[in-house]
Amino acid sequence: MQWPLYPIIILFLLSFLPRVRDVESLAWSFWGACAALLVWTWILRRQVARQQRSLVIETTLRKNHYLQLIAHSGVFLYWGWFWPEVANHAWLIVAQLVFAYAFDMLLAWSRRDVWRLGFGPFPIILSTNLFLWFRDDWFALQFLMVAIGFLGKELVTWTRDGRRTHIFNPSGLSLSVFSVGLILAGRTDMTWGQEIALTLRYPEYMYVVIFVLGLMVQYYFSVTLMTLSAAATLYLMGLVYSGATGVYFFVDTSIPIAVFLGLHLLVTDPSTSPKTASGRVLFGALYGVSVFVLYAAFGPLGVPTFYDKLLCVPLLNLSVRWLDRFVRGLRVEMLALDRLWPSMSPQQLNNGSMAVWTLLFVGMLTTNAVGSRHEGENPAFWEQACAEGLRGGCRNLLIRQSNNCREGFAWSCNEQGILLAEGTFVPGDVGAAAASFARTCDLGLPVGCANASTLAAGGSDFGRASTSMAYAWAYQDTEPLYEACDDGDGEACYLQGAAHRLGRGVSRDEARARELFARSCDLGWAAGCSSLAEVFLHGQGVPVSYQLAADGFERACDAGEAMSCLRLGLMYRLGQGITPDDIRSSALIGQACEMGLATACELRDGAGRLPAERP
C-alpha cells in the first residue's frame, strides 16, 4: 500500500521547483492535490487492511498508448519551438502526469485488487493539454479536470459487442465539461485556451506535422475513416459557404489548426468510436458538422470560438452504439461500406482510406486551403470584403487584425484600434480602441502613440500605418520584403529580419535577423533600432552589450518610438550596464508619456509598475 506514496512524494517535491514555488497559488494547488491524495491513501489503506485484500500491480504496455505518446510529444516539441510558453508549461504537464498515476492507482484499487501500470495516463494528459490549460492562479482546476477524465473512464461504462468498456473519451469528457462551465461563467480568461488555439498556427508546417504523426496512429488502429470524413465534411461545407457568400467561413483557413488537431485526437479513440466502417464515416462527418454549427453559433453570441471542437465529443461518444446498429440495419448496400466491399479486410480498407486522406490533404495544402498562405490570412482580402458589404466581412476583418495584433504586429493593432474607435463597420468600443492604440505604441509604431492621444482628446482624425509591407508579412510573402529592403525600405528590412528571427515563412537565422535589423535602423526605421537593442540587451546570439543596447534604444527614441524612450529611461534609472542618471531617466520617461505611452505616464506619476519586456 506504499506505492501511491511515491508519486505523491514526487508531486510534493515538484512544488519546490522555481516555476511552481514562485507563484503562491500554484504551489498551494500542488499541496492541495497532495493532501487529497494522502487522505485517499489513508482511507484506502484502512479499508484494505480491514477487508484483508491483496493489491496487485500488472504491467500492461498497449501499443495505442505509446504510439499516441509519440504523436502528442511530436506536436508539443514542434509547437514549443515557436511558442516559449509551452516550455514554461512543461513542468506543469509533468506534475499532471504524476498526479494522474497516483489518482489512477488509487481509483483502481478502490474498486478492485488490480491496477495496470502502463502508458495509459500519457495520452489523456497530453491530449488535454493540447487544448486547454488553466492559468497559474487557477491551476487547482487543472488537477480537477484530470480527475474527472479518469473518473469518467472508470465509472461511466457500458457493454459493447459483449465487452465492458468506457463510454467517453477521457480527455474529451473533461474538456467538454469544463468548457461548458467556463462558457456559462464567462471565465475563459482563467485559461490559456484562446492563446493555445492561436499559437498552434505559429509553426509554418504544423498541419504537415500533425498529418504525418496522425498517419502513424491511423495505420496501426484503422481510424482513418473518422479523420477523413470529418476533414472532408468541413472542407465541403466551407466550399458551399464560400460559394454562397464570397467569403471564408473560418476566416483564414478551411480547417482551423486546433480543429485539425481535434479530428486527429478527440474523435479517433478506438474504444469510444464506432466499430463499423460506415459508422466511423458518419461519426467523423457528425464531428465536422458539429464544429461547423458551433462555430457559427458562438461568434454572434460572443463565445470564444475555440470551444467549437470540444463540446460535441461526449455526445458523439454516446451515439456510437446507435450508429453501429443503424449501419448494420441498412438494407441499401450502396450506403454501407461494410457491405459495399465485403471482400476487403479492415486493414485493406484502412490503407485505402489513408491513400484517399493523403490525396485530400495534399490537395488542400497545395491549393492553400490550409496553411499559412490561405487568402483569408491577408487582411487586404477582408478589407475588400468589408468594403463590398459581404457577409461577415467587417467582423472577420476585425478578427484578422485582432489575431495579428496578438501575434505582435503593430500595424494590425493600429488598424484594430481605428475600427473600434470609428465604430462604422463594427460596434464601437472606445476602451478597446484605446487599448489597441496603446499596444501599437508599446510595439514601437509611433502612429499608435499619436492615435492614443487623439482618442483621449476626443478627436477622430486617426493616422494609418503603412500597410503594403505589413500585408506581405501577414501573407508570408517574403519576395516583396526582399525587393523593398534592397530598395532602401527600412520597414521591409525590419519585417524581413523579424521573419528570420521567428522562422516565419523563411528559415530561422539570428545572424541574418541582426543584420537586417541593423540595416532597418540605418534606414531610419525605429522598430529596427529597438529590435537590435533588444538583441544586445539579452545577448541573443551575441555577447550582452548594454552600451550597444542603450545606443539602439536612443536611436529608436529619437525616431519617435515611445517604448524605446521608456526602456532607455529605465536603464538610466536602474543603472543597467550604464551610469545611473535620475535626471536623464525622468526626462526620457516624461518624453515617452508625452508621446502617448500610458505605461510611461503611470511610472512618471509613481502609479505604475515596470513594463514587461517586449516578446
Image: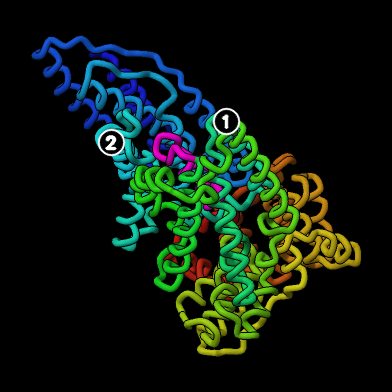
Tell me residue 434's x, y (percent): 50, 76
Label pair 2/1, CB-CB below 8 angstroms: no
Q: Residue at x 45, y 64 (%)?
A: 293
Q: Residues within 10 Å of mark 2 (few under 14, many from 20)?
A: few
Asked if residue 347 is positioned above or below residue 557 in the image, the reply reads: above
Q: In this rendering, does residue 406 appear at all?
A: yes
**Viewer-closest of 228 and 205:** 228
Q: Residues within 10 Å of mark 1 (few under 14, many from 20)?
A: few
Left or right of residue 41: residue 490: right
Q: CA distance from mark 2 to mark 1?
A: 27 Å
Q: In this rendering, does residue 587 appear at all?
A: no
SS class of the residue under badge 1? loop
Asked if residue 99 is positioned above or below residue 471 in the image, the reply reads: above
Residue 158 disc label? 2
**Magenta span:** 259-276
Q: Is residue 262 magenta?
A: yes
Residue 345 disc label? 1
Mark 2 residue type:
Trp
**Viewer-closest of 206 and 133:** 206
Tell me residue 67's x, y (percent): 54, 28
SS class of the residue under badge 2? strand
Mark 1 residue type:
Ser
Q: Earlier in the sequence, mark 2 or mark 1?
A: 2
Q: Quadrant of residue 78?
A: top right
**Viewer-closest of 381 and 237:** 237
